[in-house]
Amino acid sequence: MTRCTFLMLFLVVAVTQTSAQAQHRIIFLGDSITEAGANPGGYVALAADSLQKLSADTEVQGAGISGNKVPDLLERLDADVLAHEPTHVVIYIGINDVWHHFEFDHVTGTDPETFEHGLGELIDRIEQADAVPLLCTPSVIGEDTESDSPVNIRLQEYAQISRSVARDKDVHLCDLRAAFETFLTANNPDKAYEGVLTSDGVHLNEGGNRFVADFMVQQLRSVLEL
């Protein structure tokens, strides 16, 4: 799929009507999880519906592209996010930065230093545009969050990097990884790799989309004081 097509898709997946007078314009920035999340039943669409019921003067858009890592978000931040003059930007990234180290021959992951620096730059540029960043920890690669597999251990390390960046930059942390761990500890007793919140260990199923939507709404209600 070409970049032109991706940009057209971004415009199509805006899940509320654009209005220059909107008090809250929220953009979810991420990878394929967020790209799918803008579809009907996805977490972005569900969050948009809930947030608009709380405040009609709210717009929500999805800006996810499959395969994206932190360097990709930096490259398209201006065109795909800041050009839309958001008031708040939710950064949900990190899965591919880790996963691509392990699962794919044709791409590479993001080293820890580049990941940390890139998150900081995203936050700085969003704040310079007078928007409020909210930084999420990456969720799961496999639903056994206690697994000692190298990919799960690496993902835990990157989640900790995200926490440290949020603390150092003094921005709101959406600790999605911790929320997944708590839920899956209680609801995945067989330590299954997939099927509780995801369809394949990474991408959200119906229950996962609802879970993430509820989590995001809770986080945004706190920040927006809704």
Image: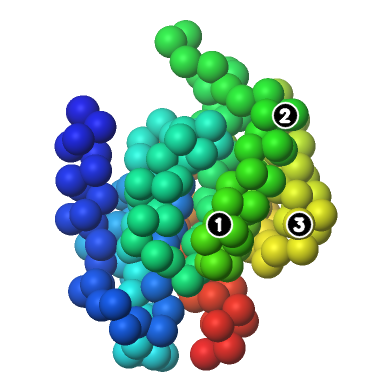
In-front residue for pair 106/115: 115
Dot 1, how many residues are within 10 Å of its Cα: few (below 14), some (14-19), or many (20+)? many
Residue 162 in sight here: yes
- The answer to whether 171 is drawn above or below residue 11 in the figure is below
Which of the two marks, 3 or 2, is nearer to us in this view? Answer: 3
Which quadrant holds residue 208?
A: bottom left
Dot 3, how many residues are within 10 Å of its Cα: few (below 14), some (14-19), or many (20+)? few
Q: Which residue is mark 3?
A: 169
Q: In this image, 176 relative to 66: left or right?
A: right
User: What's the distance in space between the residues labelled 3 and 2, CA to CA?
Assistant: 17 Å
Which quadrant holds residue 121?
A: top right
Q: Which mark is residue 71?
A: none
Q: Which mark is residue 112?
A: 2
| Sequence-wise first label, 3 or 1 | 1
The amino acid pointed to by label 1 is Ile
User: At which x and y percent is residue 38?
Assistant: 30, 57
Which quadrant holds residue 39?
A: bottom left
Q: Residue at x 41, y 84 (%)?
A: 23
Q: In this image, 98 relative to 113: left or right?
A: left
SS category of the residue bearing label 1:
helix
User: What's the distance in space between the residues labelled 3 and 1, CA to CA?
Assistant: 12 Å
Q: Which residue is mark 1?
A: 126
